[in-house]
Amino acid sequence: MSKDINIRWGWLKGMYIYTIVGAGGFGLGVIFIPDIMRSIFGWPNQDSIVYGVTGSVYLSFALLSILGLRSPLKFAPVLLLQLSYKVVWFIGVVLPLLVVGKFPIYGIVHVVIFATFIIGDIIAIPFSYVFAKQEDSSIGA
């Protein structure tokens, strides 16, 4: 692996912190105060199981991001997963709803927040590092 990989350490750690605060707070809210979260964001009632899975996933991103603060490069795939599912959500959910004119007003907050994560992750993730061939001489030692 090349030693001249450009890593934006500040952005990388900043995105972990943003994920801890944003996704972690959101996940905790969805799990522990779901009715208040629905009220704050104006969401319709949802299946508790599916809604709880969403909160659990967000909270898990936050917990893994805490580990990312300690080992930023090792946990960069957490940010990559976060980036990929948000892009898929834009393409597979938001875009079709916009095309047919059925995008709900309460979804605007999600769009804005997700867009900030996408932009931040694109800047922060050291793609050349993440996708570089890893040669680990300690395997089998």
Image (cartoon, rainbow, N blue to C red):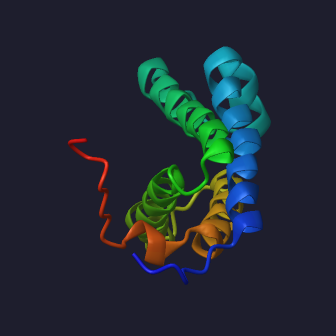
Query: Residue placed farthest to the bottom in the image?
Result: 4
Find residue 105 and report its image quarter.
bottom right
**Number of on-image labels:** 0
Which residue is pictured at 65% across the width and 61% down the height?
117
Q: Is residue 96 left or right of residue 30?
A: left
- What residue is shown at x 76% (from left), y 23% (from top)? 36
Residue 95: x percent and y percent?
46, 71
Position of residue 31 relative to residue 83, above or below, is above
Q: Residue at the location (76% across, 41% down)?
A: 21
Corner quadrant of residue 104? bottom right
Where's residue 121, x and y in %? 60, 66
Q: Quadrant of the N terminus?
A: bottom left
Of 82 and 96, the residue lying toward us: 82
- Expressed as whole percent of the image width and height from the top left, the position of residue 67 reads 61, 38
Instruction: Residue 119: name its quadrant.
Output: bottom right
Q: In the rendering, at what x and y percent does residue 25 appear?
A: 74, 33
Residue furthest to the top in view is: 32
Looking at the rendered image, the quarter that the C terminus falls into is: top left
Q: Nearer the viewer, residue 7 or 80?
A: 7
Residue name at image x 46 percent, y 71 percent: 129
Q: Nearer the viewer, residue 37 or 67?
A: 67
Most distant residue in the left direction: 140
